[in-house]
Image: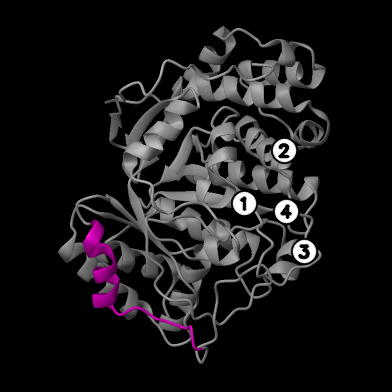
Amino acid sequence: MQIQTTVENDWRAELSKITIPISVKNDPLLMISLETLTKGSRISKDLGIDLHDNATLPGLTALARMIKQARFGNRVFFNENLHVNTTNVCTLACRFCAFRKGSRHSDAYSLTPREFVSRIEPYRHIVDEVHAVGGLHPEWTIQNYLEIFELAKRNFPDISIKSLTAVEVKHIASRSQLSIRDTLISLKKSGLNSLPGGGAEILVDSIRDRICMGKETSSEYLEIHEIAHELGIPTNCTMLFGTIENTDHRVTHLDKIRIQQDSSGGFQCFVPYPFLEDNTRLPEANLASAEEVIRVIALSRIMLDNVPHIKAYRMNIGDHLASIAINSGADDIDGTVGHEEIMHVAGSTTSLDYDGLRLARLIDSSGQEPVKRDSTYTRFESIDLEPSSQMKPLPIIGQ
């Protein structure tokens, strides 16, 4: 199945053909934004801030949905994947993180290559992607990761390995006395297929210094992804919001992502997700409401004109918000996951027992067409579901 995605003029031309919802027509900010996009221009940072703070939510989500429809119609993507965390031992102590442990903690672990493979084995005929991230182990070098990836690929050659945040790559390079480029070249040869893009948090260093002191800088995050793109390693990109940042910081983050995409072109999906307050050490966080989560997802679709996909990360926001998000600009709902620690240790209660059929039904019940994809958005399969009832989804207000 061939999915048309990112030809710049195509989606803008399609957008100009879509009937404009009343909620967009009645909001001057949104009409300015729609005209800007259909004429081939970009939403400015100032307009982005205005949209975030002042656009009506029904109108904002309606415009984002129009853009999503112009790109993908009613299709919403998911994949069959598994999360395996390599280690929770970490040299850092980011204030928002409930996952990390010191090396002497009773719950600390570091998987051997054989243990890593054993985590995948029960799912080998079900999943086509393993998502593997972890802490910055004080003793591990690139050799530990080469052995993990090589053994995984020998045992599961058809499973894509999506692994390592930018700060993990930086740590591995430093521990191994290698350049970032040479580190990524070696990891790619050992079986690494893509980077998940985690750890971006907010790409404003004054915020990073307060919530994740010691991690890579904003420019380092972008540079590491640029090198990956140059080497033919596709990546996702992310944003953690609802900590101590403000609107300007969020929009600055989105602007830096699209400027980097203009240059290197390898971001395949943007994943915005809110901070979960449980079991962490950031009591001053300005937690995002459900409405704010949807607002940020919609704004991401409107501003990121050069990033193909926007993900509603259900492991973080849950099924209910994810079903709203895919009617508000998001076109991807992530995957089956199977096992997940980082979000659930932080407070997520999202179910981990979904198979592909259940995910497809979640998408279908939201009035969208489920499409199974591979890890890098290169293979697609439409899912035909038997109708479970004669009930039709209710229309979205303003759309």
The kind of residue on which mark 4 rests is: Gly
- Picture coordinates of residue 335, whole percent (x, y): 40, 46
Of pointers 3 and 1, the one earlier in the residue sequence: 3
Of pointers 2 and 1, the one earlier in the residue sequence: 1
Q: For the residues marked 2 and 1, what is the alpha-carbon distance in whole angstroms?
A: 17 Å
Q: In this rendering, is residue 215 above or below 373?
A: below
> Circle 1 is placed at which residue position?
239
Q: Main secondary structure of the magenta part?
A: helix
Q: Secondary structure at mark 3?
A: helix
Q: For the residues marked 2 and 4, what is the alpha-carbon distance in whole angstroms?
A: 12 Å
- Picture coordinates of residue 378, whole percent (x, y): 31, 37
Left-right relation of 131 to 119: right
Q: Secondary structure at mark 2?
A: helix
Q: For the residues marked 3 and 1, what is the alpha-carbon distance in whole angstroms?
A: 15 Å
> Which residue is more in the foreground, 365 or 121?
365
Q: For the residues marked 3 and 2, what is the alpha-carbon distance in whole angstroms?
A: 26 Å
Q: For the residues marked 3 and 4, what is the alpha-carbon distance in whole angstroms?
A: 15 Å
The kind of residue on which mark 2 rests is: Glu
Of pointers 2 and 4, the one earlier in the residue sequence: 4
Q: Are marks 2 and 4 in contact (CB under 8 Å)?
A: no
> Circle 3 is placed at which residue position?
206
